Every structure is written in C-alpha cells, then in structure tokens.
C-alpha cells in the first residue's frame, strides 16, 4: 500500500519536481513490448462477476481491430427492454465511460453499471446504453513504444464505429463521453481533439497534475514514460480555444474533495475559464478518489446531466 501511495503522489507531483535534464528522456529500450498483464480482451471471470452482482443485461463482446488485426474487448450495459420485439426499431443514447488506471482493461469500471440500471428502473433517467471500452496498454494514449499501443485511435476510430454498427445507438446526437482518473485524462484529450463527435463530455477525478508535467517536460511524464509533445490536456485546451468555429459540447468536471487530484481539478477549471472554454463542475464533498463512491453520492446528477444534453441535442435536430 505504501508503494501505491508513493506512486500516486509522484504522478500528482507538480512540474517543478521533474528535473530539467529529464526533458528529453527517451523510452527505456529494455522495457517490454507490452505492459505485464495487459490484454486487449479482458473479461471478468464468472465467479467474480457473480460476486459483483452486475445487472443481467451487462454483456462482454469483442470485435476485430482493423488496424491491429486482433480482437478488442468491451463491456456494455443494455437497458431494460432492449431485446423486446416491441423495441426492435428503438435506438438509444450511449455513454462511453473510460476506465482509470494503467494498463487498460474493459472490466475496470463496469461495476458502475449497477448505478445506471437502478436509475433507469427507478425512472430517474431514460433507457440508455453504457459502454465500458478497453483503453489499451497506456490507457487512452497512443503509445507506439508498445506493440499495438494506439489506445486512443482504437477507441475513437474503431470502437465507436463498431458500437454504432452493432448496437442500436442514436449516433453523434446521442453520444456522450465520461471517464475517471486516467479515463478523465483520456476524456479531456479526446474531447478537445474530437468535439464534433460528442454531445457532452464529463472528465472525472482527472490527473491534470501529471498532464502538466507532460506539458512542461516535452512530453515526458517520467524518465521512462514519454508521450508526444503537445498531446496533453493543457496544450490541447489552448489549441481548442483558438479554433473560431469549434463545436462547443457541454463539459462537466467531476471530482471528490478528498481525492488526491482535487486541487489540480480546480486549477484546470480556472485555466479553462482563462481560455474562455465554458464548463461547470460537480463536486462531491468528502468523497475520495473513487468513481464508485462519487456515483454513490452524486452519480445520478451526472447521469441526468448527460440526459439533459441528449434532449437539447434532439431538440436542435428537430428544429433544423
């Protein structure tokens, strides 16, 4: 546990803690071609699934990646009535939840489907599909150092089109993205690069501290983890703000006050305000760095926020 806490503290360190001579650090050539334990298909063992008490409508599926030529796994939650003959022509909005942690695995956040199912069955939100994708070996980053390491591209260019082609989704006018921790970083970067693809975006508990380290050290997060310079939430926000014709999907940052990323979420919010990027924040008092505990306290508000944005997008489509 001490090792984990130390590692998290290092990732949350300010840029000043990353020395000047590390700014041109190169990946360690001795590192493995993929992280230990990572697989593009990562289903939950049946015994563990039973213990998690997931809704019966949670399914695991795969598709063959056009770019990699291998199977890619994902979980999805289908709302009650999806398989009924009476609903055979019904299409549903979809929320993509990007998991936290490294390396990736589609199993990591699927437990949140319990909250979604309860909200739908209680009539608090309309029937909605939730997708829990696999973020790849570096969790939502393109990382060519690893074999089959383009996690961002696989999600944006392959997973989303596969979901739209395979399941009865509404397409862009009913598509939202959210994520937590590492998934919050991914949500932010993907939204800033591809705002036209989403109705709304909600990055949660995001590691904006490590993202600033990446920004100020020429792409280097550490001595051995080096991303493409400029591929971070701070530089991408600055570039996004300069786009005169940029789409403006609603953005909501969500975080608990006891989370170790809380202060940097406040700083990033202030930065977005300076850039003129509209957004709001949903803060859970007393909640630590946990998507589940956030959902327990304020998850319904987050789900309903997506639904309000879906409704607004549908109204705009009808008015055209």
Image (cartoon, grey):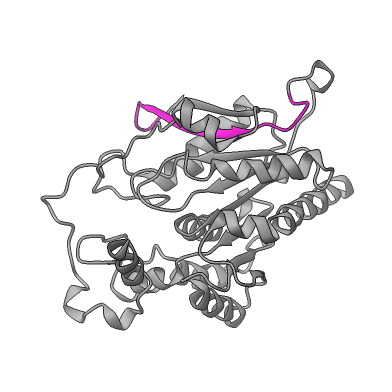
Name the residue at 74% across, 35% down. Answer: 92
* Residue 71 among those drawn in magenta: yes
> Can the viewer see residue 5 in this picture?
yes
Q: Which residues are magenta?
A: 66-82
In this picture, residue 35 sits left or right of residue 180: left
- The quarter of the image holding the N terminus is bottom left
> Quarter-wise, where is residue 43 in the image?
top left
In this picture, residue 149 sits left or right of residue 66: left
Q: Nearer the viewer, residue 316 or 81?
A: 81
* Residue 113 among those drawn in magenta: no
> Can the viewer see residue 249 in this picture?
no
Residue 133 % position (x, y): 50, 40
Residue 113 % position (x, y): 63, 41
Identity of the residue furthest to the top in this view: 85
- Vertical relation: 129 (above or below) 62: below
Q: Nearer the viewer, residue 232 or 317?
A: 232
Q: Nearer the viewer, residue 216 or 76?
A: 76
Name the residue at 30% across, 68% down. Answer: 6
> Quarter-wise, where is residue 27 in the image?
bottom left
């Amino acid at each position: 546990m001490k090792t984990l806490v130390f590692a998290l503290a290092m990732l949350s360190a300010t840029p000043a803690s990353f020395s000047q001579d590390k700014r041109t650090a190169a990946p360690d050539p001795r590192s493995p071609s993929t992280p230990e334990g990572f697989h593009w298909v990562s289903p939950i063992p049946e015994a563990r699934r039973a213990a998690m008490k997931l809704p019966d409508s949670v399914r695991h599926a795969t598709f063959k990646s056009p770019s990699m030529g291998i199977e890619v796994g994902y979980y999805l939650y289908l709302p009650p009535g999806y398989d009924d003959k009476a609903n055979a022509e019904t299409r549903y909005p979809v929320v993509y939840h990007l998991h936290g942690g490294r390396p990736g695995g589609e199993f990591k956040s699927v437990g949140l489907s319990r909250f979604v199912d309860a909200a739908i069955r209680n009539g608090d939100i309309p029937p909605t599909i939730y997708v829990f994708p696999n973020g790849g070996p570096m969790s939502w980053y393109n990382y060519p150092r690893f074999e089959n390491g383009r996690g961002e591209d696989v999600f944006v260019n392959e997973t989303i089109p596969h979901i739209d082609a395979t399941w009865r989704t509404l397409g862009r006018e009913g598509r939202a993205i959210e994520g937590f921790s590492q998934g919050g970083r991914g949500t932010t970067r993907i939204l800033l690069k591809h705002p036209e693809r989403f109705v709304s975006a909600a990055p949660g508990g995001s590691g904006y501290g490590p993202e600033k380290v990446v920004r100020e050290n020429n792409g280097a997060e550490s001595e051995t983890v080096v991303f493409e310079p400029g591929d971070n939430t701070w530089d991408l926000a600055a570039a996004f703000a300069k786009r005169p014709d940029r789409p403006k999907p609603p953005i909501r940052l969500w975080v608990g006050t006891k989370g170790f990323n809380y202060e940097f979420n406040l700083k990033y919010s202030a930065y977005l305000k300076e850039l003129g990027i509209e957004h709001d924040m949903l803060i859970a008092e007393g909640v630590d760095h946990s998507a589940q505990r956030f959902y327990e306290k304020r998850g319904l508000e987050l789900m309903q926020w997506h639904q309000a944005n879906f409704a607004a997008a549908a109204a705009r489509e009808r008015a055209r």
